[in-house]
Image (spheres, rainbow, N blue to C red):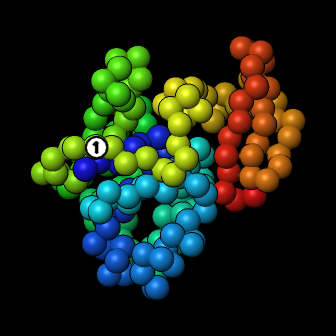
Amino acid sequence: MAILIEGISVVIRAKALSKKYPGGWEKFKENVPNQTLCADGELVRVGFMAPTDSEDYIHSLEAIGLVYLKKDVPQDIIVIDQQSGPTKNCSWIEFGKIELDNNPEKQISASWLKGSEIEEVVMPENWKYEDSLSAKYTFIRAEDINGRMIRFKKEDGIETYYDLKTGKTSYVGRTNK
């Protein structure tokens, strides 16, 4: 099995999560800060659109005993970028691009536990390609935001920006309201 990777994905080993998370899987699911959770039985993924949100989430996982890095090597947690893959060398994860529905126009990023056989990719509940970051990915470097983007609304965890370069509206889901 494999899990969808979009935006900045915090990926956790399912075995570590079940051993270390107080209250187990059910309590973990209750505490996920957004609607991006997906799991394949070996890996668990929660996605973010802003680096600070993913960092805050990792700190909350570390506070309950999960280990992100030990001597700069991922232990229970790895961060995976939708475009470039794992942000650290990691011996237990694989990453790749996969055609959704055997359609080369519908590319998604996915990760799986090294040695697993990919039979299907698990997506978050209610995920639709047409509305996804896989279909509509845009990346703007943090240092370019102030000169290019105007934030004109922040409501219910969604920041709305106007892009001066493209004339389009963009949305960023945030977990730290």
List the single residue furthest toward the bottom. Answer: 23
Task: Say which residue appears at 29% left-offset and 48% top-offset.
Answer: 2
Q: Is mark 1 on a helix, strand or loop?
A: loop
Relative to 39, residue 164 above or below: above
Query: Within 10 Å of the Cα at label 1, are there few (<14), some (14-19), or many (20+) other Cα atoms?
Result: few
Task: Say which residue appears at 71% left-offset and 30% top-offset.
Answer: 170
Q: Residue 133 placed where, x, y %? A: 54, 33
Q: Residue 94 placed where, x, y %? A: 23, 45
List the single residue furthest toward the right. Answer: 152
Q: Which amino acid does label 1 sit on?
A: Glu
Instruction: Report whether residue 109 is seen.
Output: yes
Instruction: Report whether residue 147 is seen.
Output: no
- In the displayed structure image, the side of residue 109 where residue 132 appears, left or right: right
Please identify the quarter of the rendering in which residue 139 is found: top right
Quarter containing the C terminus? bottom right
Relative to 164, residue 15 above or below: below
Task: Say which residue appears at 31% left-offset and 30% top-offset.
Answer: 97
- In the displayed structure image, the side of residue 89 where residue 175 appears, left or right: right
Q: Which of 46 and 103 is in front in this view?
A: 103
Relative to 130, residue 95 above or below: below
Q: Residue 107 placed where, x, y %? A: 38, 25
Task: Say which residue appears at 30% left-offset and 24% top-offset.
Answer: 102
- In the displayed structure image, the side of residue 6 where residue 92 appears, left or right: left
Q: Nearer the viewer, residue 67 or 154?
A: 154
Relative to 34, residue 59 above or below: below
Q: Mark 1 points at which residue?
A: 120
